[in-house]
Image: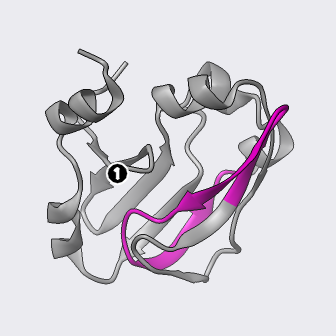
Amino acid sequence: MVRDDLKYTKEHEWVKLEGDIATVGITDFAQGELGDIVFVELPEVGTTVEQTKPFGTIEAVKTLAELFSPVSGTVEAINEEVIEDAGIINSDPYEKGWMIKIRLSDPQAVESLLSPDEYRELSGDK
């Protein structure tokens, strides 16, 4: 499922923009490919993240993958619930399964993200 109210990355992260705050998580496609997610490692609040650079890791039963920041800025919040129970990401990747909130340092950077239609084409979700 690709939501029309979000932006996406080629690395399968989604971004929800609210003013200069970007909420970030992984897509439904990504959680499906990873399988049962058992652990996430996220940066601390106050950490500076850079667009396209790793900001954490996500571990599933069969694999470990890096999480890439879709935008640059400062981490304003982390989702403590997914740290306690990473399986939330499998059941609700777009709402309860969000990972971090970033205060954008360059709001124009979101223009480089994929639209829902572009992400549908990339992920094969027609």
Please state which of residues 83 and 39 is positioned toward the viewer in this rendering.
39
Above or below, 91 relative to 85: above
Tell me the quarter of the image containing the N terminus.
top left
Is-magenta flag for residue 12?
Answer: no
Label 1 crowd bin: few (<14), some (14–19), many (20+), radius 10 Å: many
For the point 73% across and 42% down, the residue is 82
Q: Which residue is mark 1?
A: 9
Q: Relative to residue 106, is residue 103 drawn left or right?
A: right
Above or below, 32 relative to 17: above
Residue furthest top as drawn: 126
Above or below, 2 relative to 13: above
Is-magenta flag for residue 75?
Answer: yes
Q: Which quadrant of the figure has residue 70? A: bottom left
Going by the numbered disc 1, the residue's amino acid type is Thr
Magenta region: which residues? 57-79
Image spot of residue 69 (x, y percent): 47, 65
Above or below, 71 relative to 3: below
Image spot of residue 11 (x, y percent): 44, 50
Q: Relative to residue 115, is residue 55 drawn left or right?
A: right
For the point 85% across and 43% down, the residue is 84
Please state which of residues 60 and 26 is positioned toward the viewer in this rendering.
60
Q: Secondary structure at mark 1?
A: loop
For the point 28% across and 69% down, the residue is 20
Image spot of residue 95 (x, y percent): 50, 32
Tell me the quarter of the image containing the C terminus.
top left
Q: Relative to residue 65, is residue 86 drawn left or right?
A: right
The dominant secondary structure in magenta is strand
For the point 54% across and 31% down, the residue is 93
Please state which of residues 22 and 111 is positioned toward the viewer in this rendering.
111
